[in-house]
Amino acid sequence: MTTDPRQAALTAATTPEPWDILVIGGGASGLGTAVEAATRGYRTLLLEAHDYAKGTSSRSTKLVHGGVRYLAQGNVSLVREALHERGLLKQNAPHLVRDLGFLIAAYKWWAAPFYGIGLKMYDLLAGKLNLQASRYVNKAQALARTPTLKQAGLKGGILYFDGQFDDSRLAITLMRSLEDHGGVTLNHAPVVGLIREGGRVVGARFRDDETGQEHEVRARAVVNATGVFVDDIRRMERSDVKPMLSPSQGVHVVVDRRFLPGDSAIMVPRTDDGRVLFAVPWHDHVVIGTTDTPVPETSLEPRALPEEIDFILRTAAQYMDPAPTRADVRSVYVGLRPLVKAAEGTDTKSLSRDHVIRISDGGLITLTGGKWTTYRRMGEDTVNRAAAQAGLPERLSLTAGLKLHGATQADLPEHWKVYGTDAEWVQSLPGANQKIHQALPYTEAEVRWAARAEQARTVEDVLSRRLRALLLNAQASIEAAPRVAAILAEELGRDQAWQAGQVRAYTDVAQGYVLR
């Protein structure tokens, strides 16, 4: 057993000295805000109720993109900003972001010139940070890039380029970057109440879920960046506050790579319900999605509706040959979008994906909306507001040029690339050549690293977010859970009863990702 690093983090978090900025929430927006604050030299604490990227931030379509659909909606400013941020993220985290070609197949004579014009605008908006220029490809070239594309009636297509990444690995990288710059961060530490003095929010009470003990922390500025759960925190300040969000859910299915064996993704620009659909190669599998279904309430583990899965598979079958069926689905995952409320009757797919910052009368700063691609800009805007409100010394933002933890241009093997410069340390640990399951690419050394260096506390933390086993093959991840629990118990000093409880808890969650 190694020394458990959590106690040191808990001690640092509960210092009696007030923090400059307290961030509640460890997803894209919270981590982006905390890194922004810490790199400006502000004393920064981040508290996460469950685990980093536990919610929406680990369940994206795995794209760093400007949003072709937003261009069609006429939201040019959002697209321009997102394309700029896409370019910065590729420079700052080259171990996590790569260029990926997307093919829009043309089955009608007008489709290629129609979409080609729009994508030239996309290229122009990216400016000097554009990845590669979009271009027309003929039928043979289209099939060379995507061999399983349906051939009947295919005229050719438009090839354009966007970025691809691993969302929860970026979250862990931001957590490590925050620590690198003096910030303190703690997961499994839900905020259970806000501290108010003279009508102002001056801190929060949180519970350490591992001990059940509650602690108080104070801060000059408190940021609520809890994604789809921001209204829960806002109600801690004022119980009658009007909800900000109209959440919707996006469903993805994951299938084997044989359904998309080429080197490009497929983008369907207009599905039957007016959305876009992607089939994207990812970690030697294929992610297909997504949907946009309004949901009445938020939950930690949202579930796909049968009609959503049918819609994805039916749409995929219009373009892929062979097309995946329900029997081919390795995992189903669902993310909730924190869409800011609009007028009554507005369709969720037409709601803005811009981020929104609201400051309450008591000074609670709430950040919501946005998407992974613009996480850095969200953080910059929020810290600007927080610093001004708290009277902190004005300091320039450094994150546009900040290399994130592990950043390297080294040509690492694909599997180890997400660790960047940490890869050699991971591979030096026991079990570097021992897989946790034959159907999964992950090793026992990665489980040890997750516990020692990446704040993994549970089997789910490891199999869902430090490794991506839950999304790649849910059933295989369930079968790997006992071994992962045993390694974690060794690393964290836990007993057999803890291991058994962890396996039960993980199995309960993971069963929801298996398509029955």
Image: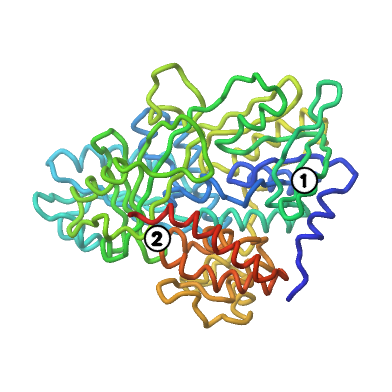
Q: Amino acid at mark 2?
A: Trp
Q: Amino acid at mark 1?
A: Thr
On screen, residue 436 above or below 214:
below
Q: Is residue 225 left or right of residue 161?
A: right
* Label drawn at residue 282: 2
Residue neighbourhood size for the residue with mark 1, other residues' Cα within 10 Å, grouped as few (<14), some (14–19), many (≥20)? many
190 or 450, nearer to the observer: 190
Does label 1 or label 2 sit earlier along the sequence? 1
On screen, residue 172 above or below 35:
below
The residue depicted at 61 percent of the width and 75 percent of the height is 426
Residue 326 placement: quadrant: bottom left
Residue most extreme to the right: 16
* Label drawn at residue 44: 1
The residue depicted at 56 percent of the width and 59 percent of the height is 460
The residue depicted at 33 percent of the width and 51 percent of the height is 288
On screen, residue 348 above or below 342:
below
Q: Position of residue 440 (x, y in %)?
A: 44, 71
137 or 225, nearer to the observer: 225
